[in-house]
Amino acid sequence: MTDTNEQTTVVRETAFDLSAYLTRQKARVEAALDASITVTYPEKIYESMRYSLMAGGKRLRPILCLATCELLGGTEPMAMPTACALEMIHTMSLIHDDLPAMDNDDYRRGKLTNHKVYGEEIAILAGDGLLAYAFEFVARETRDVPPQRVLEAIARLGRAVGAAGLVGGQVVDLESEGSPDVSERTLTYIHTHKTGALLEACVVCGAILAGASPEQVERLSRYAQNIGLAFQIVDDILDITATQEELGKTAGKDLQANKATYPSLWGLEESRRQAQRLVEQAKAELAPFGEGAAPLSAIADFITRRTN
Ligand code: GRG
């Protein structure tokens, strides 16, 4: 074996094991989510909320929040309630996005969508219930964090979800439907708001809860904006290249709906290049945090590798 090969082997052996990290963190998040909602009267709404919340998924948003809090010296109890709230909000956005009035999807996370199982009225209310409970959960369950930081995290969450975030992105997405000639600027608005805002809130809230300085929050926010856009570009690519089994939802929906996407603007190869460029920019923001940022750096790489 040559020196170069030996070096490569050492780097490989000491490299961060993202797969083990994601498996471990996902299990911790799932346990916290499972304990977060008990079915009580009126049972149907709680069952519907739990159905979608416990339907699987990568749990990337809570994992990002926990990883950022830990990077800055915070503990799991400081961030887990917010991490769960982020997954509740993400889940509610999926339930509403799948409704006949929006994307009209039958499958999500490999299962029938909420409205297919419980009916539209209950699905709307399950989304509303999860959204309201997310904020209650952060306020009641956060431990060992000064109240001012919790308030700031709640404010950031609210901003990411409302008209300045997810809701605004979804509105422009709906308005642009059926127009494949949507400009790159509009497409970027849609995705930085519909997808990027919540991913950014995950990282920023984790940082705030741990007591990050404004400069650290800014830097981590730029990391998150870059991975947020890369995540959506990959989502657009997967809609074309992945199967329904891989995605757990209907594949090819964007083409079917004649929707403007990054691949329709740039082509597949250029879209892949742009996603990779954003991931590299994201990782560059982590440089001052040293080795402790290995999980965030590996998650950025995972975004371009993912298959669902
Ligand atoms: C938030 C009040 C409020 C309303 C919702 C419907 C809506 C407004 C917004 C749509 C948001 C949406 C569905 C964005 C798409 C984000 C996205 C890329 C989802 C897929 O995320 P993954 O791949 O999914 O992380 P899993 O299942 O792994 O969690």
Image: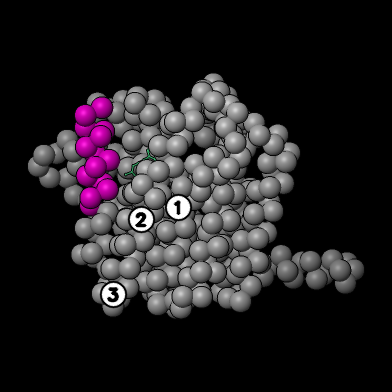
Q: Which residue is under mark 1? A: 197
Q: In this view, does 14 lie above or below 193?
A: below
Residue nearer the viewer, 112 or 205: 205
Locate residue 200, reporting x and y percent: 47, 58
Q: Name the disc covering residue 159, or none.
A: 2
Residue at mark 2 to residue at mark 1: CA–CA distance: 9 Å
Whether residue 61 is visible: yes
Tag count in the figure? 3
Q: Tell which quarter ligand 1 is in.
A: top left
In-image side of 70 versus 226 (left or right)? left
Q: How crowded is mark 3: few (under 14 residues within 10 Å), some or many (20 or more)?
A: few
Q: State the SS at label 2.
A: helix
Foreground residue, 31 or 128?
A: 128
The answer to which image quadrant residue 43 occupies is: top left
| Label 2, ligand 1: CB separation under 8 Å | no
Marks 2 and 3, how far apart in space?
Answer: 17 Å
Q: Residue at x 28, y 78 (%)?
A: 146
Q: Is residue 68 above or below residue 308?
A: below
Q: Crowding near pointer 2: few (<14 within 10 Å), some, many (20+)?
A: some
Q: Which residue type does callout 3 highlight?
A: Gln
Horizontally, is 225 left or right of 278 in the view?
A: left
Which mark is in front, 2 or 3? 2
Mark 3 lies within 8 Å of ligand 1 (Cβ measured): no
Kindly indicate whether the residue at mark 1 contacts the one at mark 2 (C-beta within 8 angstroms).
yes
Magenta segment: 120-133
